[in-house]
Image: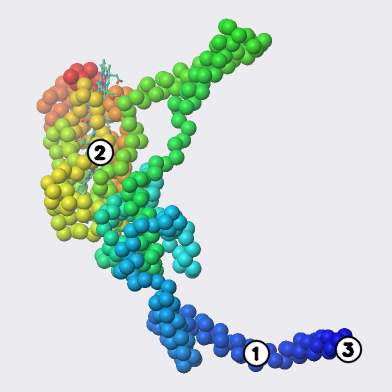
């Protein structure tokens, strides 16, 4: 009896399965309407009705309505008002971790994707990043509330801020947790990039090998083969001497030195793009020994009006104004410096010698972040003095080097190098 019953059910099931293609159009229709409801709910939810559909308007409205009511009910039941959330001050370890993950863009937020660290770097970088780094913004907001932070993120003011912080859809809770992480970060500071194996480590390693091999050769004699010991000794010995010599020469030289400056000042923006003459800012280069770094008041000639930069927004330029307002000098980090026992004059090279700044300082015009280009060694000065011709049509030389000019005019010499007029005399460069 039972058997027949199950067999019957199976028959019916098989039959419906066979006939189901015939029902598909209607069922599909049913599903379709339901689908559109779902889709339209989502659409209106996200775009806030800006994209009102061309069809099925009634369905859509129905959908939105129900959606809204459930949403409101949900929030009433489960969460507190934003103003209360923003005031939260103690966090569990898990909440802090979520704040960190949100900042790093690792927390799952549905289809929305964002990461603060792609712009606000947390590791010290050796290239120019126009955005303020994570430490800078964390410090700036340390004494401010999570609600203040929500304002720059959700209702940004200023063209740049609107551009970079647009489309951020964060809940009050997310922002509060991120703020908690930022407060922690403000006390930790930026991470240093991972150290690479330095010459010093290699040197120590070579030295240890050298010592082991040496003691073995003389005292222990574990290796029967003396040649092996001698080989190790000579290789490590040469290596040690090579490293010491290279470092001794480079000692006190700073080629490649490219420090973080207190303001992200770019020569590419000013001397390149805006074509401001080098002399406008380094105005003593033609007339005195030093070229000089411009004071804040020079920046203010223009930044009195220009308060927003295309790349950095308002943050960097605000530092100029802040320095001026508080009567403090901007503490630029100096790149080029010859030792105290050397005499070098810009006026002599730029005015009399007619040498372009680029010849000695590299392609400044196209550089955002300057680095120390020539090594400023004595060899570098002398090389140029030995190879560079003096411009004998220069009035200055006509007067002081009349003898050279006469020989030149008579065709007895075809050129005079700087070395020929004293460019190699120790006393000219050394006090
Ligand atoms: C708008 C003003 C301005 C202009 C124009 C300008 N500079 Fe500068 N320059 C600065 C400031 C500010 C610094 C310090 C910050 C830095 O090192 O980036 C500086 C630094 C330098 C330094 C490094 C000095 C050191 O030892 O620290 C060199 C070299 C230099 N400028 C060369 C040039 C040359 C060459 C030009 C023209 C192509 C030029 N500058 C145009 C403002 C200017
Ligand atoms: C001759 C006019 C002039 C002087 C002098 C000047 N600037 Fe500027 N600076 C500009 C202009 C114009 C811009 C806007 C460039 C842009 O947005 O493309 C600018 C932009 C900037 C920016 C933002 C760059 C960006 O794109 O975000 C910084 C930072 C800056 N200047 C710093 C300085 C400092 C520091 C000094 C003084 C050493 C200085 N400026 C002197 C004209 C000047
Ligand atoms: C696309 C790059 C970008 C992303 C992503 C970004 N920011 Fe910013 N942020 C900027 C820039 C650029 C400024 C400076 C704008 C200015 O000064 O006009 C800034 C400024 C800030 C400031 C300082 C505001 C002030 O008052 O000076 C804070 C705080 C900040 N961001 C937080 C965040 C947080 C938190 C996130 C992650 C949710 C984030 N930002 C994501 C580019 C970005
Ligand atoms: C012949 C090579 C040479 C030329 C050309 C030259 N400089 Fe220099 N510059 C130097 C040396 C060397 C130093 C380091 C000087 C010192 O320590 O006193 C220096 C230093 C500087 C500094 C640091 C601050 C200071 O006053 O010493 C600035 C800024 C600078 N130069 C800008 C310029 C500009 C702008 C020009 C073009 C108008 C220029 N230099 C042309 C070799 C040169
Ligand atoms: C790119 C080429 C170049 C470099 C690099 C250079 N100089 Fe010169 N130097 C010249 C020229 C050209 C003159 C001739 C100008 C003159 O007669 O006053 C000159 C002249 C001088 C003089 C005056 C010599 C005299 O007879 O009156 C001194 C001092 C001097 N340089 C020092 C230095 C020092 C120090 C350095 C390195 C830190 C240096 N120079 C690097 C091109 C250079
Ligand atoms: C064109 C300029 C110039 C002339 C000429 C010159 N020197 Fe130098 N000398 C320098 C500079 C620049 C340095 C600094 C190099 C450095 O910082 O590494 C230097 C460094 C030195 C040092 C220190 C060692 C070192 O490398 O740091 C000695 C010693 C020295 N010079 C001796 C002499 C003697 C001797 C003469 C004459 C034969 C002479 N110099 C001519 C520019 C000159």
Q: Looking at the image, is mark 1 or mark 2 earlier in the sequence?
A: 1
Q: Nearer the viewer, residue 156 or 81?
A: 81
Which residue is the site of mark 2?
Answer: 333
Quarter of the image that includes the C terminus: top left
Give me the disc on residue 299. none
Q: Residue 352: x, y in percent?
A: 17, 32
Q: Which residue shows up at 25% across the image and 20% down it?
A: 424
Nearer to us of marks 2 and 3 is 3
Badge 2 density bin: few <14, some 14–19, many ≥20, Cα 10 Å = few
Which residue is the site of mark 1?
Answer: 27
Q: Looking at the image, is mark 2 or mark 3 earlier in the sequence?
A: 3
Q: Nearer the viewer, residue 259 or 70?
A: 70
Give me the disc on residue 1. 3
Q: Is mark 2 within 8 Å of ligand 1?
A: yes
Residue ranking furthest to the front = 1
Label 2 element class: loop
Q: Residue 396: x, y in percent?
A: 13, 30
Q: Residue 300: x, y in percent?
A: 15, 52
Q: Which residue shows up at 44% across the image and 89% down it?
A: 61
Q: Is residue 431 above or below residue 396?
A: above
Q: Looking at the image, is mark 1 or mark 3 earlier in the sequence?
A: 3
Badge 1 density bin: few <14, some 14–19, many ≥20, Cα 10 Å = few
Residue ranking furthest to the top = 218
Question: What whole-number distance in Å separates the C-alpha atoms at marks 1 and 3?
Answer: 35 Å
Q: Nearer the viewer, residue 415 or 303?
A: 303
**Left or right: residue 171 compared with residue 142:** right
Q: Is residue 54 above or below residue 82?
A: below
Q: Which residue shows up at 61% across the image and 90% down it?
A: 29
């Amino acid at each position: 009896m039972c058997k027949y019953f199950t067999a019957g059910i199976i028959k019916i099931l098989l039959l419906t399965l066979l006939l189901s293609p015939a029902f598909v159009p209607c069922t599909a229709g049913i599903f379709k309407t339901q689908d559109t409801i779902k889709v339209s709910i989502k659409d209106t939810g996200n775009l806030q009705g800006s994209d009102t559909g061309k069809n099925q308007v009634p369905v859509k409205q129905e959908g939105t309505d129900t959606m809204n009511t459930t949403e409101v009910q949900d929030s009433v039941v489960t969460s507190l008002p934003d103003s209360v959330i923003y005031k939260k001050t103690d966090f569990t370890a898990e909440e802090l971790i979520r704040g960190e993950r949100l900042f790093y863009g690792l927390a799952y937020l549905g289809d929305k994707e964002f990461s603060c660290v792609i712009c606000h770097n947390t590791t010290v970088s050796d290239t120019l990043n126009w955005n303020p780094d994570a430490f800078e913004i964390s410090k700036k907001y340390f004494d401010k509330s999570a609600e203040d932070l929500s304002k720059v993120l959700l209702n940004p003011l200023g063209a740049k801020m609107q551009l970079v912080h647009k489309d951020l859809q964060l809940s009050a809770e997310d922002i509060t947790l991120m703020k908690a992480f930022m407060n922690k970060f403000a006390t930790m500071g930026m991470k240093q990039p991972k150290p690479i194996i330095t010459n010093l480590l290699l040197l120590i390693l070579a030295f240890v090998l050298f010592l082991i091999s040496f003691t073995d050769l003389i005292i222990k004699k574990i290796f029967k083969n003396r040649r092996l010991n001698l080989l190790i000794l000579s290789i490590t010995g040469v290596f040690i001497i090579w490293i010491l010599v290279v470092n001794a020469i480079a000692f006190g030289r700073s080629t490649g030195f490219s420090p973080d400056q207190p303001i992200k000042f770019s020569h590419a923006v000013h001397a390149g793009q805006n074509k401001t003459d080098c002399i406008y800012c380094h105005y003593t280069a033609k007339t005195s020994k030093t070229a000089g770094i411009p004071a804040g008041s020079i920046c203010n000639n223009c930044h009195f009006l220009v308060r927003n930069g295309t790349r950095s927004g308002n943050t960097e330029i605000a530092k100029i104004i802040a320095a001026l307002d508080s009567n403090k000098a901007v503490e630029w980090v100096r790149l080029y410096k010859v030792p105290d026992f050397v005499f070098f004059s810009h006026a002599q090279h730029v005015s009399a010698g007619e040498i372009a700044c680029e010849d000695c300082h590299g392609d400044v015009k196209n550089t955002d972040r300057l680095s120390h280009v020539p090594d400023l060694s004595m060899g570098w000065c002398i090389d140029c003095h030995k190879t560079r011709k003096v411009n004998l049509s220069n009035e200055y030389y006509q007067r002081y080097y009349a003898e050279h000019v006469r020989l030149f005019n008579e065709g007895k010499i075809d050129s005079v190098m700087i070395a020929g007029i004293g460019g190699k005399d120790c006393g000219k460069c050394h006090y």
